[in-house]
Amino acid sequence: MNEFAGAAILVVDDEAPARRLTIRVLESHGFRCTEACSKAEALETVAAAAPELVVTDMKMHGGSGASLIAALRTEHPDIAAVMVTGRDDAESADAALLGGAYGYVIKPFALNELLFTVTGALKRRALVLENRAHRDRLEALVRVRTRELDDSRAETVKRLARAVESRDAGTGMHVDRMSGLVYRLARALGWSDDDAETLRLASLLHDVGKIGIPDELLLKDGPLSADERLVIQTHASIGHGILAGADSELLRLADVIAWTHHERFDGSGYPRGLAKAEIPMPGRIAAVADVFDALTSDRPYRAALPEHEALATMRADCGLDPAVVDVLEAILRRGAHAHGAPG
């Protein structure tokens, strides 16, 4: 019994007698056949109702069988093809195999030879489709697992950020507001949505180093002494020590931000006194968002500044990247700024 009985086969030949003979043989063994007399007609037929297999003559008016097979491979990769050629053109048949044919027969061919080649091509096609489906399922599974891993990492980052923030009651929901502004700044600077979202998540850990600062300094109500301020400033290096060497792209980016968001464009920042282009762009973006949220939020020692006063203060005193501050001003002018993370 023919395991591929009912398979749809398109027979392409510009000589009607040869075409009809091939169809008669194939239909007598349970295949469903349609016909075409040229490459153009074959492609029209395929577009209307794709067969499983095309059996095509090598030499035809209006386009060779080899060019038809090449077109099928590009436009209809799920369709198998078998080449029919003359005895004096075996090299072309071999070339057809390299071009994507699943087999060939040489005219005049025995009927069993045609059936064997057609069946073999259909078997190979079934195997290719099965392997492709298996690959697609595997790739889908990898995407799901990767997404689950990314979600898990993001959740870990969020929880760690909350743990750090919970030690400083005065900062409220600073990390959410700051990271939301980081996202908007990155998008306005031309970053893709995916990259901006990764930057947003990484910026949640910008102050992770505060986990190593004593409570008596972190929670102090009054002004800090010069020595106490130096201790607080060590949180940038502590954060770098926590995050450095991570395998995760997200945590590596968080390391960059934690280590550089207190650097200043004029070189007056800490911990390394970097200036201008020495400061990575993620750190420059995070610095602008961090300072703006700090200035526009109520703190125990002062009331929140209006946005226009905060901008003026940032331009005058903070050594922030002026290009990023310009983008922030444009966002505020458009009314696009809102506290909190996107979504």
Image (cartoon, helix red, strand yellow):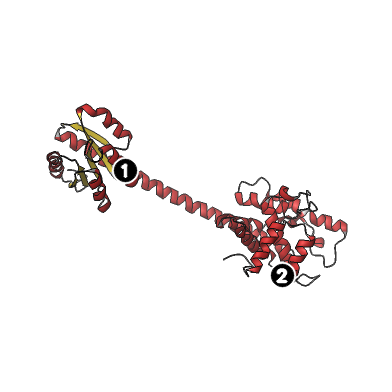
Q: Quadrant of residue 37?
A: top left
Residue found at x 24% / y 28%: 90
Q: Quadrant of the C terminus?
A: bottom right
Look at mark 2 in the image and give the residue it sits on: 307
Q: Secondary structure at mark 1?
A: helix
Look at mark 1 in the image and give the residue it sits on: 71
On screen, 336 above or below 191?
A: below
On screen, 133 above or below 316?
A: above
Count of residue discs: 2
Identity, as a three-letter code, of the amino acid under mark 1: Ala
Q: Quadrant of the N terminus?
A: top left
Residue found at x 16% / y 46%: 30
Q: Secondary structure at mark 2?
A: helix
Could you tell whether 287 is left or right of 196 in the image?
Answer: right
Q: Residue furthest top?
A: 88
Q: Quadrant of residue 204?
A: bottom right
In the rendering, at what x and y percent does residue 42 appear?
24, 46
Residues packed near mark 2 inside 10 Å, few (<14), some (14 to 19) or many (20 plus): some
In the rendering, at what x and y percent does residue 243 appear?
68, 50
Identity, as a three-letter code, of the amino acid under mark 2: Glu
Q: CA distance from mark 1 to mark 2?
A: 61 Å
